[in-house]
Image: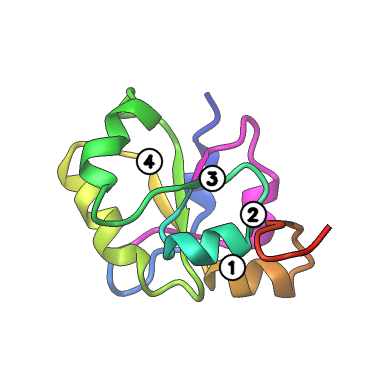
Amino acid sequence: MNLSFIKRSTRPRSGIRQLTPHQLVRQKPAPLLLDVREEQDFLREHIDGAVHVSRHALATRIGELAPELSTPIVMYCAVGDRCAEAIQLLESLGYQNVASLKGGLQAWLEAGGLVECSRIGRSG
């Protein structure tokens, strides 16, 4: 398992590891990508392959999503500031390789990253 993304990530003053969008796409195998935004925002658009999990349901769902505590996990929100609480929760549960997408979905889009868009609310 390639854990080098953790070593290359930056560590802001808050102590949360961060990856840039470019670092995220270079990860092989890809880490578990968790979108912690509101469900309606996830349904509107999200990074391909991301799994939605609300911050409130994270503690109960993480065991099924990442049964191994060494699983590389990257979380994102809209601009990167909602992830801190969720990352702290996972670290308190023993997860060792947790990071945040620096700048969130906004940075992903600005870097040219692709998203999946929902057809909810569209006709045809």
Q: Reply above or below: 49 against 77.
A: above
Q: Residues within 10 Å of mark 4 (few under 14, many from 20)?
A: many
In the rendered structure, the answer to whether residue 122 lies left or right of residue 87 reads right
- Tags 2 and 1 in contact by the CB under 8 Å rule? yes
Q: Which residue is mark 2?
A: 47
> Residue 33 location in percent, x, y?
52, 45
Determine which of the numbered discs, if any, sits on residue 5 in the image.
3
Q: Nearer the viewer, mark 1 or mark 3?
A: 1
Considering the numbered disc 3 on the image, is that residue within a helix, a strand or a loop? helix
Q: Residues within 10 Å of mark 1 (few under 14, many from 20)?
A: many
Considering the numbered disc 4 on the image, is that residue within a helix, a strand or a loop? loop
Residue 101 shows up from this direction: no
Q: Earlier in the sequence, mark 2 or mark 1?
A: 2
Tell me, yes or no, whether the highlighted magenta stretch contains residue 18. yes
Q: Quadrant of residue 69?
A: top left
Q: Earlier in the sequence, mark 1 or mark 3?
A: 3
Q: Amino acid at mark 1?
A: Leu
Q: Which residue is mark 1?
A: 105
Point out the stretch of residues depicted in magenta. Answer: 16-33
> Residue 49 location in percent, x, y?
63, 42
Q: Amino acid at mark 2?
A: Ile
Alpha carbon distance from label 2 to label 4: 20 Å
Pick the front one: 76 or 55:
55
Callout count: 4
Q: Reply above or below: 103 against 3.
A: below
> Residue 82 location in percent, x, y?
35, 70
